[in-house]
Image (cartoon, grey):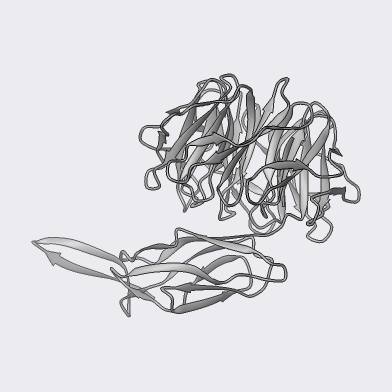
Amino acid sequence: MKIVIWTAVAGAAAAIMGCSIDGKYTVGGTLTGLTGQGLVLEDNSGNDLGLASNGAFAFSDGIKNGDAYSVTVKTQPSNPAQTCTVHNGTGTIDKADVTHVIVSCTGAGRFAYVANELSNDLSAYAIDSSSGDLTPVANSPFATVGTAPVSVAVDPNGRFLYVVDNGSDDVSVYAIDATTGALSAAGVASATGSGPYAVTVDPTDSYLYVTNFAADSVSAYTIDAATGLLSELPNSPFAVGTNPTSLKIDPNGNFLYVTDFGSANVAVLAIDPATGSLSGVPGSPFAAGSGALAIAIDPAGTFAYVANETAATLSEYSINPSTGALTAVSGSPLATGSAPESLAIDPAGRNVYAANVTSKNQVAVYSITPSSGALAASGSPVAAGILPASVVIDPSGLFAYVANDGSGDISVFAVDAATGALSAVGNSPFAAGNEPRSIAID
């Protein structure tokens, strides 16, 4: 029960909102991705909270106004083993309960999903956790609800696959069988703007966003927690720059970053945590290179990188955690000598992986300088298939997966834990459908 206390200060009425009866406030947030057992959080090294399921949580002990809170993981889950990371976990109580802590849990990838644009289907694979090999799941490939699927994303809880259908201007939802990895269509597809290109889900598993390449906008939706189905926000779509392509959300769930291919910049939009609505941040958009096509953000939310396909460069930025603004790193952009089309960062935040199309057909590795975010080429690029269009890193950090649009297959590489270097696994590549455009790991 909450009360509102009104008091006169210098003849004016001042409201003190959200003050609890005992003068204390709760700290909580959202847990996603938990599949293991035994997760224990703690606040201020004293108040323990065991969690067994995803969703909202709150610590039992309250904290007085003006006092600090610090949420950490005391015990990581096991059976299966997972790594849970806390975001928005520290601060000071300011006359209100804290509800924005995000705890994200990941483990070794179980399944991989690929959007095959020309064959209008989805390839699904089981991942061998020791070798990285891919084995098609029963009944794969799965026919898509829409046409020309070009982008896929798995929700943070691993229950649903979201597919952008460029040909039918919609985004469709598929339930994931947790045991087999099989897909089944969930309800009807939701309309997007013209030419949808990419999709992402926020870290709380509450909101989904789609770039509309031909409409110069981003469509925004709320996610039904039970069914995975989408409801478009009343004020969606939101205008961005010319020909928006990829989009990413920072790990704290505060900002959406959108690459604008036609206007060579990055639009930054603040996310309203209560509604999912978007609004531009001061200074947005921020300059990138010609043909800004893909963006990646490091796990700490400190640095961002943009693949400029036409300019054959990588733009490097530091991120202001309070405003979301981007500041170019000294020496940015970095010349690549190729056309980077897709970027991924390992879970430790040490390396950037760039899938380079055109005649090179390679994946290049760049080490991240921790102090500045500057990139440096690391070793020699490795050969992929023809037109590598999408690269992802397994949540364990052990393997890299590349969808090769031109050769219709998936290259799989082992990641060297010390150097980040890539080496093809023994049975790579693995057959996919016609023009695989995007890959996601569950």
Q: Position of residue 121 (x, y in %)?
A: 83, 37
Seen in the picture, residue 206 relative to 113 is either above or below; the reply is: below
Which image quarter: residue 439?
top right
Nearer to us in this view, 243 or 84: 84
Nearer to us in this view, 5 or 429: 429
Q: Position of residue 325 (x, y in %)?
A: 40, 38
Seen in the picture, residue 306 relative to 158 is either above or below; the reply is: above
Seen in the picture, residue 63 relative to 245 is either above or below; the reply is: below
At 67% from the left edge and 33% from the top edge, which residue is drawn?
380
Which image quarter: residue 63?
bottom left
Q: Quadrant of the N terminus?
A: bottom left
At 77% from the left edge and 29% from the top edge, which residue is drawn?
405
Q: Position of residue 354 (x, y in %)?
A: 63, 34
Q: Position of residue 349 (x, y in %)?
A: 55, 48
The residue furthest left is 10
Task: Judge whether residue 265 can be spotted in this image.
Answer: yes
**Count of residue discs:** 0
Nearer to us in this view, 309 or 47: 309
Seen in the picture, residue 423 relative to 213 is either above or below; the reply is: below
Nearer to us in this view, 431 or 143: 431
At 51% from the left edge and 23% from the top edge, which residue is drawn?
289
Q: Is residue 268 left or right of residue 13?
A: right
Task: Judge whether residue 166 can be spotted in this image.
Answer: no
At 88% from the left edge and 47% from the top edge, which residue is drawn?
136
